[in-house]
Image (tube, grey):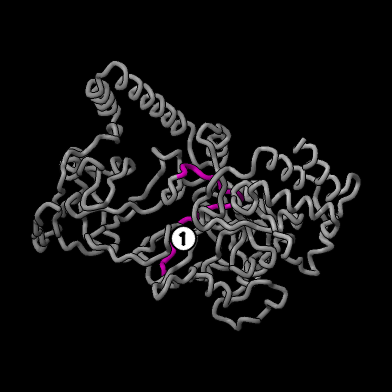
Amino acid sequence: MATRRKDCAYAAAVGPHSNTPRWRSHSGARFRQALWRRGGGSRGWAVMPENVQQSPDHRQSECRPGLHQYLRRKLSRGGGRGPRAPGSRADHALALGHDDGRLRKGALEEGIGPSPRWQSRVDHFSADLNLRVGDCVRVRSFDEILSTLDRGGCLDSLPFMPEMGDYCGREFRVSKRLEKYNDYVYRTGLRRMKNAVLLEGLRCNGESHGGCQALCQIIWKEAWLTRVAEKRPRQPNLLGASPTAGLGHSVCMKDDVLRATRGAPSGDELRFSCQATDVYKASSRLSWWDVRQYWRDLSSGNVSASGLIGGFAFFLFSLILRVVVLRVGGYRLLVGLYNRVQRIRGADPYPYCQGTLQRTPAREMNLTPGELVRVKSYDDILRTLDTNNKNRGLWFDAEMVKYCGGTYAVLCRVETLIDNKSGRMIKVQNTCIALEGVTNQGDYHGFNPRNEYLLWREIWLERVPVGLGGDSSSKVLPPA
């Protein structure tokens, strides 16, 4: 009976043969109250209470029947999917039918999306270029990109950062198509991204974010790019130009992009906002068993056929290993057999071995950028890890195993990082080293293409002497 009353309220509010919502009618009020009672407000749903008035610009907005049918189905299942991660933002325009063709169903499911007064306008640019690895693209001019952003400096909740302005009007090649990423912040697993790519060699230098040294690879929406085959006049970088130069038609201004680098204040503590902190809001849930994601990895060029087969083979071995260990035993025998086969093939050993220490040692080598170092063997590094596979709080990831035994140059000493969850600037207490070309390839994380730099403790490295002037001195610290 309750379902029938709700359906009647829905039909009265929307109208059986009309696309115009009668939100000011008595039936529309009953429908809004039904939405609110069924958990809309408590679950972050896009529902307005009775005392909230609509703006004149939105009262005559066209209602899309498909959106309201989705709302009705959602309510019949008892509202949303449960609590959301901090920072997600409900959009009350969804319940009022103000979709305007820009908010996707995935954003509705996650309870995120741009505010109605921050709508971005990308109608005149192609938001889906279907770019593949190796395609040559040109970054649009700064004023063109501004016209795609909302007042928060975002497109589909992904911010355009001031550091990206230096690349406007220049040509680059696509290194990866960003169809998904691995959520390390809220630990929700893989998440879906749409119409986004990574360009070769373009990383954030942190100039507008307090000097952050994470060196994150910049994410580019396809609406900000154009294929080189499309002949367009090159535009100069307008980031340093007048805020109103050629931007009269844009919702977002230069000052809005700069202002968006600061997150919500927390007392006297400064907080930052960037792509790394907001990428969760710009993505949607992705199930690990959704096989379409692997087809997208293969068709876009992110992963080769051999790499995909190898990834599935390792997944099957890990699954068998869990089943055998839980029911029969023989963990060491299976891992030893795997490592022997991998040694014959010249491949990596099993990357999920555990450390055994309770207190971990450290070593100061005073490494400087440009020095050559050799990564110690996997067995030597395991002797420096605790039972959580950490050394003084720094995780030794499975992606780092492939670099063991290799020689690399020191890129930099990482001393400051932005915490991706809170936006606070963190001062690194123990020395972390980034090595040139040593990045996370995603082989053991669902082929995550983010390609972020891996951080190393100095005790995991050893200096390679260069000539007679090499300084091989080091200081061993007591266990922590």
Per the image, is 119 magenta? no
Relative vertical location of residue 416 with respect to residue 385 in this rendering, above or below: below
Q: Position of residue 282 (x, y in %)?
A: 56, 54
Q: Which residue, as the protein is rendered here, is positioned at the far front?
A: 1
Relative vertical location of residue 221 with respect to residue 17 in this rendering, above or below: below
Tell me which residue sits at (55%, 32%) in the image.
291
Is residue 18 found left or right of 294 in the rendered image? Answer: right
Tell me which residue sits at (72%, 65%) in the image.
52
- The one nearer the camera, 370 or 160, is 160
Q: Quadrant of the N terminus?
A: top right
The stretch in magenta equals 188-206
- The one nearer the camera, 131 or 334, is 334
What's the magenta bit mostly, secondary-structure-wise? strand
Q: Which residue, as the protein is rendered here, is positioned at the far right?
A: 17
Q: Give the quadrant of residue 387.
A: top left
Q: Position of residue 147 (x, y in %)?
A: 67, 68
- The one nearer the camera, 73 or 289, is 73
Residue 193 visible to the viewer: yes
Q: Position of residue 409 (x, y in %)?
A: 26, 56
Relative vertical location of residue 383 with respect to residue 415 in this rendering, above or below: above
Q: Which residue, as the protein is rendered here, is positioned at the far top?
A: 328
**Residue type, label 1:** Leu
Residue 100 visible to the viewer: no
- The one nearer the camera, 78 or 215, is 78
Per the image, is 193 magenta? yes
Tell me which residue sits at (25%, 64%) in the image.
369
Q: Give the quadrant of residue 436.
A: bottom left
Q: Which residue is mark 1?
A: 202
